[in-house]
Image (cartoon, helix red, strand yellow):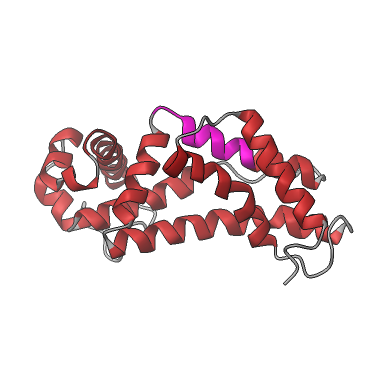
Amino acid sequence: MDAVDGEPGTVRPGGRTARVRESVLRAAGDALVEQGFDGLDLADVARRAEVGKTTVYRRWSTTAGLVADLLTDMAEQSEPRSDTGSLDEDLRANARLVVRTLTDARQGPLFAAVVAAANCDRRTAEALHRFYAVRIEEWAGCVDAAAGRGELPPGTDAREVIRAVSAPLYYRLLASGDPLDETVADRAAAAAAVAARAGVYVS
């Protein structure tokens, strides 16, 4: 049975249902990259995925629901955080992962399309916020570990440190259009580390 109860992405379907979900989400990502959120259409996604329209409408019901599940899947597929034992190395790994994602031929345009959609659709915005909350929470662990080793002042807000690493990278993607590369990633990580050690993120 292709229908799954509950909000999209809240279950881990197996068998044929999992294959259908994978095909539909891949097709949705392709459509978003090519046409943006305004051009996203459930019938077109079903055609691309070579599944029945009824299956897509029953499971996801709206384009916002489909994008929400796509973001859930992206979070599930994301690389785990680094654990090198060094704050500088961990933040550098985080920044480089963000840059690799944003400069990827598929992932970069996909993120840009999703962010644009979130500006005009509440459900997509909520899904995007959940996606980043999950990723920030995971990477915050390396900052908490650094504080435990005495590398950072007590009371350092780990989540704010991680946000500080990625913020200038997303600015380049979404606002300035300036190049993104490992040098930029390393600079963002180093700046966040210096600020954290100076107590800027103590709450």
Is 169 part of what is drawn in magenta? no
Against 200, residue 169 (above or below) is: above
Q: Quadrant of residue 157?
A: bottom right
Where residue 42 sits in the image (x, y, percent)? 15, 47
Residue plotted at (50% across, 45% down)? 171
Which residue appears farthest toward the right when viewing the image? 150
Where residue 131 sits in the image (x, y, percent)? 46, 55
Number of numbered tags placed on the structure image: 0
Question: Is 116 positioned to the left or the right of 58 in the image?
Answer: right
Q: Nearer the viewer, residue 19 or 38?
A: 38
- Quadrant the C terminus occupies: bottom right
Against 6, residue 168 (above or below) is: above
Is 104 part of what is drawn in magenta? yes
Residue plotted at (69% across, 36% down)? 186
Q: Nearer the viewer, residue 48 or 89?
A: 89
Can I make out residue 56 in this image? yes
Q: Quadrant of residue 59?
A: bottom left
Magenta stretch, overall SS: helix
Residue plotted at (78% across, 70% down)? 155
Against 91, residue 182 (above or below) is: above
Can I make out residue 78 in this image? no
Magenta residues span 95-105
Where residue 101 sits in the image (x, y, percent)? 50, 36
Question: Is 117 positioned to the left or the right of 108 in the image?
Answer: left
Question: Is 64 positioned to the left or the right of 78 in the image?
Answer: left
Residue plotted at (69% across, 43% down)? 189
Q: Nearer the viewer, residue 98 or 191?
A: 191
